Amino acid sequence: MERRFSSVCLLCSYSQGQVVSALTQHLSPCCSLCPAGRMGIELYLDLLSPPCRSVYIFAKKNNIPFTFKQMEVLKGQQHSVGFGKVNILRKVPALKDGGFTLAESPAILAYLSQKYKTPDHWYPLDMKKRARVDEYLSWQHSAIRPSVLKIFWLKVVFPLYMDQTAPEEKLQEALEDLAIPLKQLEEKFLQDKPFLVGNMISLADLVAVTELMQLIAIGYNIFEDMPKLVEWRNRVEKAVGKELFQEAHKVILNFQDLNSMLIEPQLKEQMKPRLLKMVA
Amino acid sequence: MGLELYLDLLSQPCRAVYIFAKKNNIPFEFKHVELFKDSILGRKMPGGNNPGHSHEGQHYREEFGKVNILKKVPALKDGVFTLAESTAILLYLSRKYNTPDHWYPSDTQKRARVDEYLSWHHTNIRGKAGKTLWIKVLIPLFTGQTLPPEKLQEVMDELAISLKQFEEKFLQDKPFIVGSEISLADLMAIVELMQPIGVGCDIFEDRPKLSEWRNQVEEAVGKELFQEAHELILNIKELGNIQIDPQLKEHLAPLLRKMMK
């Protein structure tokens, strides 16, 4: 089965079309005429994914030249042969810098901050401040991310693949699991500071907010009765820049559009066991 | 008042911090925290909740509570600065004490490899390897019930997938994750993988590459230190005859129920 795929290079606006076969070929045409496409880094991103958003925002905010390699995880593009060479773990985000490839958003963010010498506040050199960023980035892996992932899958992905909604109790359960971590976010990490680590935005805020936006965008008022977190979220958006923030979140904010996405039956079958396990 | 490290060597990340600090001759006060709060090895520690030591015990617990509001181990206290999360603690120690470069290389790409592993570790090795201890020892100890063998098999199957990825993506044909020298990545991985060993699940059997790596890591750490750090987990079966505080049992019940699902 073939699909015509085209994209506009974000750097030189050259438009290129390419015929590809879904699931087996390397997708995401690269702009071979653009100098950035030849020399700069490539970021393989699906803005539906929170870690991808944090990488995207960070790169754009810091004017880091990169080629945006569009990935659509819900269509199974991470299983292509080409992407396997970029990241054998078949996850996004992924970075390619010449012969060097890298997975995992905290690693990518730290790499970019080091390579492009981004302003100190993102990942402060001060040992104690840096430790606070590390602490948050480590903690969120098991405290926040799994619940957000589960809720998103149950609410948005499950219906897409299974043609039915997921049981409400499972969603409620997952939301309840988030209650304590959100309290901890407010009381241990944020406290009375404007941002998680101090007076300025850092990687910690970026990762936190892009993650929690996943739920806010699909209609969960997770900051209900938590005005401190609401204010902090607004502050982070402002520090990033409203335009960039909104642009990065466009796909998730328009999640309803996903309902018209055509998913190949083969892929649906592949995903079924995992989805069924989530509601078991 | 110097550096304090709050540790329970039953916990994998605590072992990584302990080994790293000892290996690098970082002076610290070992603050023993017993995750299961009671005299689980028949030793009454100052931090225990027995009435005889109430004043001291309470102070200690309050102190620890202040140190780490997340109430988990490991935790670090450096003057007024407190820190949780083993990754953050290890990185902090490596910077503050200027440890040899190979632990956390200054080279951007090598460093990225360590960061990449430490991030992936959380959701793929951490938790999965540790479940074996819960299923084989702790849940039976706390509930008096043994779990069906399928439960353990499920965990081992999941772990097998992660171990495959570990070998194929992170280790490949290198002696250590980053290359020719041990780093924080290897340390975090090994302490986690020793957990199933302690309960008789030999994950190194039939995995020669992994086994070779394990030996190399042990050698790089130093056999004596490695064995010392793992003494508790390798003798975990001795916990079988200990009485557990009923209050504690009750407190852990919801957590255990979740794990048994």
Image (cartoon, coloured by chain):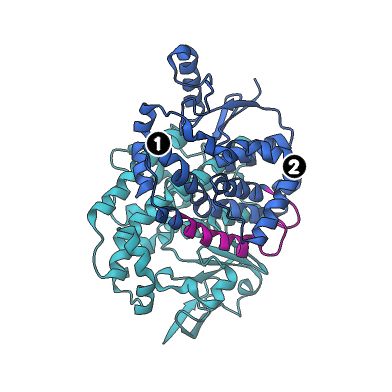
* Amino acid type shown at disc 1: Phe
SS of the residue under disc 1: helix
Instruction: Report the span colored magenta.
Output: B155-183
Q: Chain of mark 1?
A: B
**Chain B color in figure:** blue
* Amino acid type shown at disc 2: Gly
> Where's residue A196, x and y in %?
48, 39
Magenta stretch: residue B158 in it? Answer: yes
Q: Chain of mark 2?
A: B
| For residue B89, above or below residue B204 | above
| For residue A77, above or below residue A201 | below
Residue A239 makes an appearance in the image: no
Q: Which residue is mark 2?
A: B222
Q: Which residue is found at the position 49% from the left and 81% from the top?
A: A24
Q: Determine whether, in the image, residue A28 is placed left or right of residue B226.
A: left
Distance between the alpha carbons at the discs numbered 1 and 2: 35 Å
Residue A129 makes an appearance in the image: yes
| For residue A247, above or below residue A208 | below
SS of the residue under disc 2: loop
Q: Nearer the viewer, residue A202 or A269?
A: A269
In the picture, the disc for residue B142 is: 1
**Chain seen in cyan:** A
- Mark 2 is surrounded, within 10 Å at the Cα level, by few (under 14), some (14 to 19) or many (20 or more) other residues, namely few
The extreme front residue here reads B241
Q: Are marks 1 and 2 on the same chain?
A: yes
> Where's residue A21, x and y in %?
46, 84
Magenta stretch: residue B255 in it? Answer: no
